[in-house]
Amino acid sequence: MSISPKFEHLTAEDKWYAYWMDHKFFKSVPDQRESYTIVIPPPNVTGVLHMGHMLNNTLQDVLIRRARMLGYNACWVPGTDHASIATEAKVVQKLKDDGIDKFEIGREEFLKHAWEWTHKHGGIIQQQLKKLGCSFDWDREAFTMDEVRSESVLKVFIHLYEKGLIYRGYRMVNWDPQAKTTLSDEEVIYKELNGKLYHLSYPMVDGEGSIQVATTRPETILGDVAICVNPNDERYQNLIGKKVLVPIANREIPIIADDYVDMEFGTGCLKITPAHDINDYTIGKKHDLEIIDVLDEEGKLNAHGLHYEGQDRFVVRKAIAKELEEKGFLVKAEDYKNKVGTSERTGAVIEPRLSDQWFLKMKELAQPAIKAVMDEEAEIQLIPEKFKNTYRHWMENVIDWNISRQLWWGHQIPVWYYKGDRQKIVVALNEVEALEKARQQFGDASISTEDLQQEPDVLDTWFSSWLWPLSVFNGVLDPENEEINYYYPTRDLITAPEILFFWVARMIIIGYELRDTKPFSNVYLTGIVRDKQGRKMSKSLGNSPDPIGLMEKYSTDGVRVGMLLTSPAGNDLPFDEELCEQGRNFSNKIWNAQRLVLNWEVADKAPSASDIAAMRWFAEKKLDTLEKLEASFNSYRISEALMTTYKWVWDDFCNWYLESIKPAYGEAISKAVYDQTIKFFEEVTTVLHPFMPFITEEIWQNLRPRKEGESVSLGEWPKMQKVDSAYLADFDQMLAVVNGVRNLRASKSMSPKESLEIFLPAEEALSSELRELASKLANISKIEMKAEEAGPGFSFLAGKYEFFVPAGEQADLGAEKERIEKELDYLKGFLKSVEKKLSNERFVNNAPEAVVANEKAKQEDAQSKIKALEESLARL
């Protein structure tokens, strides 16, 4: 059969993905089999593939493809998220570039632009996931704002509201001035930034001196309503109850006392600005202080900002510092590192802001979700377990979830106000239902839609994605449908640790609330993809390679292997492009092995003893590998599973097995051996397929004639059986002999073509069944028990035995004697240290039995090697 010299990955990848799609190999419908379900962590609808997506989705694909081969009804659900803040920001910017203001065109027109943007820029990441080889059931693709998902979100809001868990409250929230919306605490990223600590002087109203206050935000002094000191601070006890003037504003404010104030920080005096700091707000409520908000929703100073009205907060910070200095209020300004909250989505510095928002009570809802993960017999496993403590800390200290966002793109909150009265609320799925409820609720049949105004805010994006495992199977709207009962709970969730609380915990919470059961069984938390310097990959740093470019250069299989080889769960991945090259080299190795096998001439002759030995060994090695893989997959050590497979394919199959059965030049291979080798090769491609789907499909199709509609992706995972460990040990001993002979040739400059004799130290040193194969692999003319008259020669260690090779006429026996003496010195020193440990009664009596046994085994091994080397030395 004519096979291309190299794997043409670009052509093959397109061809085989289209083949899989045409035949709907990944489509799943409920049947009698056990289900195995994964739902994708939905990427942003207008997003593009990045390295984190590559890692996450490759891991999911490995698990789902293997599950399919194990006989499960495997279902991997794709989909995308509407990403309220990110998408709206892009649409607003696009409109701004076109000279259009969002508020001038109104909500309805804006949403038309948002849908247009989504349709235009959406769909890119789905095509890129196909390029990655992801075996999704594409017929199930969902979107968090499609009809089913949208109605599900509204229905759950109503359910929670009617249970008394959702309420409207005036609270201090995290405000993103760029997106002009509130954010949850989890969406605030704290960064250490360089700033200034300003020491300001507030004059006493009675003219008796002044009081100093340190602040990092001088622009907020115009909202000061008090100066607070610690009641135990002797420096200020005589000032409590007096008043000071706010610099520039010239307003009188009181000096109050509260033990919240840290006497060691700054001057020990704290300015209280309740509208701009959560702690100040708490103190303000406690002491019944007024609230003066000096900032608007864009982070600009409002009318309370006096002559700074309309200017950005950071511009004012510099300007007001200068004015304070000029007027004698600035004592000093010193460099200061400060942790500043920034928006996860826009990067803008967050402002604490008092605002009317919708909240979900979390404490009660969280209890079953804590039990599900933290109980001794936990229903949900976090992998790795180190994240359990983080999960518990967050869940036990959970605060009410701010679920409203001041945006238009998203699920508009299903609340209607009667005649603008925020106390008269109707909660309904739609306007028609709201009207009917309002008439009943307020006892007025004349109420019309004009009397009702819907809440303009939308729900937090996570309020839709926390329903994802339920809503993709329509489990909210139709909770007893066949699919939700078959596919839910899902099996595995693969995601990043940074959304453990955003998404994972919330899915668990709502799963128990709506169905009283877990949404998944296992959560595999991946690491973060970083560059070689340990930096997180980002566009701003320019250290993130283009995933598509990598796949085009190194092949998709090569990139998948490169990423997975160093991606243990929960640990960051130090990505290096050389890893992809290693993956490509692995592809080349397998491809060339295929070319070698398919180019052999086949003859109807009996297998040789060495062929039989090699086939028996590889069959056992396969079982041994399957056993290791089972352990690795069961503990979600995917990187380890790939490395086990890598070594089995590269070392055991491509190197040792194929070399063992390879016919001599010009000769044919036994048909029985060839047929068995094709079967082995098929099993190799099957086990390797989840990691490298494209090249394995191509090779599997080449190995023998196939019918249309056949695929390795539908292959059966090889069955596990008991491993003959004794035979594997014998074979390892044989390989050690072969390597020993090869190393001896290299060190003594002997030609590989020169046939050698070797003498065995004992019959069991190399089984008779494997002597023929050793002779073939190492070009050995004779293997027999050593004879007394063998004369001088060389020795080498293989396993625990010392093998002897008679010396030729040109042999440098002096150098060999020197080598043996050096090795003897080392072994005698090693034996002495072991015997010293074993002579220590305290060690022998107190160390674990296995540890003592291991030391005794080391002693016996060293003694036997020393004896063999001394015998070899005596012959020289």
Image: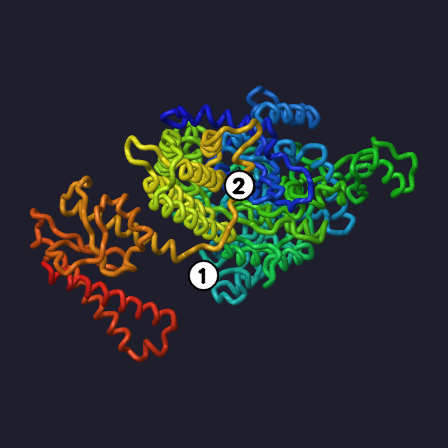
> Is 400 situated left or right of 212 in this image?
right
Q: Is residue 47 above or below residue 729?
A: above
Residue at the spot x=40%, y=42% of the render? Answer: 649
C-beta proximity under 8 Å, tags 1 and 2: no
What mark, if any, has residue 344 been given in the picture? 2
> Is 713 situated left or right of 463 in this image?
left
> Is 516 situated left or right of 54 in this image?
right
Q: Residues within 10 Å of mark 1 (few under 14, many from 20)?
A: few
Residue at the spot x=14%, y=52% of the render? Answer: 806
Q: Indicate the quadrant containing the N terminus: top left, top right, bottom left or bottom right.
A: top left
- What amino acid type is highlighted by mark number 1? Glu
- What amino acid type is highlighted by mark number 2? Glu
Question: Looking at the picture, how far across and down is residue 660, in whole percent?
Answer: 33, 42
Q: Nearer the viewer, residue 543 or 472?
A: 472
Question: Looking at the picture, how far across and down is residue 472, in whole percent?
Answer: 67, 39
Label 2 sits on a secondary structure element that is loop
Residue at the spot x=46%, y=34% of the render? Answer: 696
Question: Looking at the picture, how far across and down is residue 13, in whole percent?
Answer: 48, 28
The residue where tag 1 is placed is 264
How far apart are labels 1 and 2 at the CA level?
32 Å
Residue at the spot x=9%, y=49% of the render? Answer: 811
N-term mark: 1 or 2 = 1
Question: Looking at the picture, how far across and down is residue 489, in whole percent?
Answer: 66, 48
